[in-house]
Amino acid sequence: MPTESGSWSAARQTKQKRKSNSLTLKRTNSSEQDRPGLQRDLLEGQDSKLPSSVRNTLMDLFGQIEREFENLYIENLELRREIDTLNERLAVEGQTIDGAELNKGQMKTKASHSTSQLSQKLKTTYKASTSKIVSSFKTTTSRAICQLVKEYVGHRDGLWDVGVTRTQPVVLGTASADHTALLWSIETGKCLTKYVGHAGSVNSIKFHPTDQIALTASGDQTAHIWRYVVQLPTPQPTADTSQISGEEEVEFSDKDELDQDGDISSDCPTVRVPITSLKSHQGVVIAADWLVGGKQAVTASWDRTANLYDVETSELVHSLTGHDQELTHCCTHPTQRLVVTSSRDTTFRLWDFRDPSIHSVNVFQGHTDTVTSAVFTVGDNVVSGSDDRTVKVWDLKNMRSPIATIRTDSAVNRINVSVGQRIIALPHDNRQVRLFDMSGVRLARLPRSNRQGHRRMVCCTVWSEDHPTCNLFSCGFDRQAIGWNINIPALLQEK
């Protein structure tokens, strides 16, 4: 057997000596004030190569660590006393584990097991005592104020955008990563028209203000303008989905996805060729919108530019450059020639085309992460949403600072503001849809329980002001759009 070298033996002796001294320190019952000095005295006689200043610093640190452990030990004792007290109360109320055994000699042998069961019992009791309050609040919100009316299912991949026509008949449009855009009957949920002209994901859909024409943006680096003709089917009675029992939120996995292997849109009338294709971008076209009047369109792209086109000639009128990173969204003012673009560079820009000879631009840096969307309201406001989990309301007359800031617990996607009531609908990464007023006060959260609501990230919302059945629509990565009826008077009364 090999023998230990002299240096190795010395190292072992030194280690054992340090261990022995550390045990001696732990057994010392001195006060906290005397302990650091005593520890230093005990180390004075040791043969150490460390400078005295370094040793003093180490001892101070060891003393702090020891005090922290003592505090934790004291807290642990207090918690154990509280558990014993709660256990006694439960025993008096007849809710203790194993009946009277906790008052007998078996308490010690079952301490660990009983404590675990007691903790679970307390959680169950607390949940039961509060569930009535929570359920009553959720019932009021989901059934009386925000009611799920219809689900629009037929896409084979996630939905990026949802829109509502501005002309009669009023229909719903959805843009999907499955390379298609679908038009739906709002009342029946039946697919009316299928557009298959794009070779990439359809990222946006907007309808012409006066004609039956749609504008779609795609990952194939183009935006298409195409015409549709729809005939609404006869409405059929629908089941009241708000009467589904149970209001507890349920987490869903991929196995809970709707079985959509059968494409129910396959029998829809299909539009294959656009009337106009806008092709000036060098990257994904992520969004597009009509300027007031419908004679021009603006597109936003991952090539860091936004383009303004003449619809009739398909010619590029202006290329809007200046963003440092990919654009995420674009929106036009409902009554004026104004465009707002948002970007991953944490800014959004306001482009003014009201004067044909001057095209001014203003840059706004109000967020700390990607600005996912910025939209106009009917008044002089802009509302911006971001991945930094905030939504900010701005006054166009003074854009130096927001007039309201909404802080959320999840990234915010494409927001939408109702024209009449000025209510902001926020779609979130965490599957929630929340409603706020323009001053930042939360009004409601759309139901998301017992298979009601979205099961994946919600990408977009859009208001339909005058539709009697559904006046808010949302879409997400769960391959469906949902129509909601929002009781506006009750919503504002709750406020």
Image: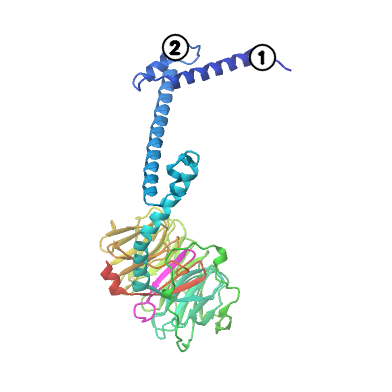
Element under label 1?
loop
- Local packing at callout 1 (Cα closer than 10 Å; few below 14, some 14-19, many 20+) is few
Q: Nearer the viewer, residue 160 or 131?
A: 131
Q: Nearer the viewer, residue 450 or 193?
A: 450
Asked if the magenta segment contains residue 220, the reply would be no
Q: Residue at x 50, y 14 (%)?
A: 49
Where residue 405 appears, as percent x and y from the top left, is 31, 58
For the stretch drawn in magenta, the main secondary structure is loop
- Local packing at callout 2 (Cα closer than 10 Å; few below 14, some 14-19, many 20+) is few
| Residue 264 seen | yes
Amino acid on which disc 2 is placed: Glu
Q: Nearer the viewer, residue 310 or 35?
A: 35
The residue identified by callout 1 is 5
> Can you say whether 214 is above or below 439 in the image?
below
Q: Where, quadrant-wise, is the N terminus in this rendering?
A: top right
Q: Residue at x 44, y 12 (%)?
A: 44
| Residue 357 seen | no
Where residue 32 appears, as percent x and y from the top left, is 35, 23
The picture quadrant where one finds residue 296 is: bottom left
Q: Nearer the viewer, residue 99 or 41?
A: 99
Residue 44 tag number = 2
Sequence order check: which comes first, mark 1 or mark 2? Answer: 1
Residue placed farthest to the right in the image? Answer: 1
Horizontal arrangement in the rendering, residue 317 relative to residue 181 (left or right): left
Residue placed farthest to the top in the image? Answer: 45
Q: Residue at x 38, y 39 (%)?
A: 81
Amino acid on which disc 1 is placed: Ser
Element under label 2?
helix
Q: Where, quadrant-wise, is the C terminus in this rendering?
A: bottom left
Point out the stretch of residues depicted in magenta: 455-472
Where residue 193 appears, as percent x and y from the top left, is 52, 82
